[in-house]
Amino acid sequence: MHEIEPYDNWQKYYRAERDMRSPFYGREYGIYYQDDVYGYYIDPRWDAIGSETLYCKILYADYALSACIIELFGEWNDTLHNDSMHFKRNVIDRLLLNGISKYILISENLLQFHGGDTDYYEEWFEEIEEANEASGPGWIAILNQRRHIEEEMTKYGIDYYINMGGTLQIENWRTAKPKQLIAVVDQLMNRRLGA
């Protein structure tokens, strides 16, 4: 697991640790492995969110576009760890406060999902709807989900709040610049939502 690294080719466009509006502002990244998921050390550049098993990396945030791209890593476990609460309270709430209403979650390195209550997904969804008046239609989209994770999320009704599957399997997202990826996903989401 220590070999799975967050995508870093967009650091010339954005770095969360240098963004005063980011929940990870001021963070310094060492070279030593400290965090682990189930006893396996992980790359020190993943950002801890208060969960034992779920980590993330804000790859890009554009406040003018009201959009951000977040890469996920580990296991999303609402059953044991209430990870949706940690993610919502420690990452999303700060981004919402700063006007972000369009979320691209890259889930290639999300290895497992265990569902639970949907309260935090519902809260996030409702807050994006409220933000729509000011910044246009907001949405949450997950790219490149593993099939078993999509099936599990659908089983728990998460697909009501988060868009997934189908055209959101964008395997070549790394070849785009961040604004290009946002534009592509925004267009896909406008079609899905009939905006």
Image (cartoon, grey):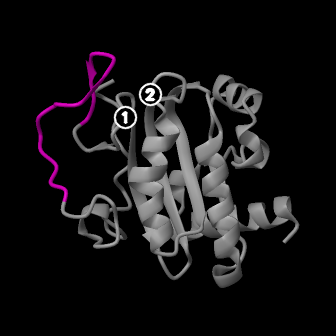
The image position of residue 129, as x and y in percent, is: 70, 67
Q: Which residue is mark 1?
A: 51
> How many C-alpha atoms fall within 10 Å of the one at disc 2: few (<14), some, or many (≥20)?
some
Q: Nearer the viewer, residue 112 or 143?
A: 112
Q: Is residue 143 visible?
A: no
Quarter of the image with the N terminus in it: top left
Q: Earlier in the sequence, mark 1 or mark 2?
A: 1
Q: For the point 27% across and 29% down, which residue is it? A: 42
In magenta stretch: residue 192: no
Rendered position, 79 above or below 182 = above
Residue 142: mark = none
Question: Can residue 32 be spotted in the picture?
Answer: yes
Mark 2 lies on a secondary structure that is loop
Secondary structure, mark 1, is: loop
Q: Which residues make up the magenta segment?
A: 27-43
Q: Amino acid at mark 2?
A: His
Q: How far apart in space, not on screen, are marks 1 and 2 (Cα)?
A: 7 Å
Overall secondary structure of the magenta stretch? loop
Q: Residue at x 75, y 32 (%)?
A: 154
Q: Quadrant of residue 37?
A: top left
Asked if residue 28 is among those painted magenta in the image, a careful observer would answer: yes
Judging by the rendered image, the residue that carries numbered circle 2 is 81
Tags 1 and 2 in contact by the CB under 8 Å rule? yes
Q: Is residue 137 above or below residue 55?
A: below
**Residue 159, percent across and down?**
74, 41
Identity of the amino acid at label 1?
A: Ser
Residue at 18% from the left image edge and 63% from the top image edge: 26
